[in-house]
Image: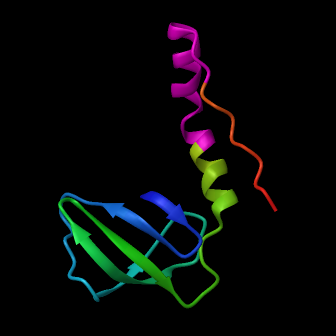
Amino acid sequence: MRNVSPGGMCIASRTLQPSTGEMLRVSLPGQADLQAQVRWVGKGEFGVLLTGGSGLDLDRIQSSNRQRNAGFAAALERLLGVRPQEPRPSAV
């Protein structure tokens, strides 16, 4: 997944190459399955618009990504003295 928003996302895939307009089911850990319509297709990636439902829980996805990447972030800091940028608070 790339460029995730509450209403859609870009999905990179080496094997799945859907057609524009095709309906898909998107399953993500810790989230209800979502229906999505393919809006564009490029080389090795495609964009979907989420239809129905309440969209994605972006806070949960960000938290999961931080946990999954914690080891990598620690290695960067230890080896290179580089600390990954902290997420900015959402402007409301």
Image point (60%, 27%), residue name: 84
Horizontally, residue 44 falls left or right of residue 83, namely left
Residue 16 in the magenta stretch? The answer is: no
Q: Quadrant of the N terminus?
A: bottom left
Q: Quadrant of the C terminus?
A: bottom right
Span highlighted in magenta in the image: 66-83
Q: Position of residue 4 (x, y in %)?
A: 51, 62
Q: Give the vertical position of 62 relative to 50 (above or below).
A: above
Tag count in the figure? 0
Q: Position of residue 76 (x, y in %)?
A: 52, 18
Image point (51%, 8%), residue name: 79
Horizontally, residue 92 falls left or right of residue 54, namely right
Q: Give the vertical position of 63 relative to 43 (above or below).
A: above
Q: Position of residue 8 (x, y in %)?
A: 48, 73
Image point (19%, 71%), residue name: 17
Farthest right residue in view: 92
Image point (58%, 77%), residue name: 32
- Say which of 25 and 54 sits in front: 54
Q: Position of residue 20 (x, y in %)?
A: 25, 83
Q: Image quadrant of residue 87?
A: top right
Q: Image quadrant of residue 21?
A: bottom left
Farthest front residue in view: 91
Q: Give the vertical position of 67 relative to 52 (above or below).
A: above
Judged by its main secondary structure, the magenta piece is helix
Residue 82 in the magenta stretch? The answer is: yes
Horizontally, residue 34 falls left or right of residue 14, namely right
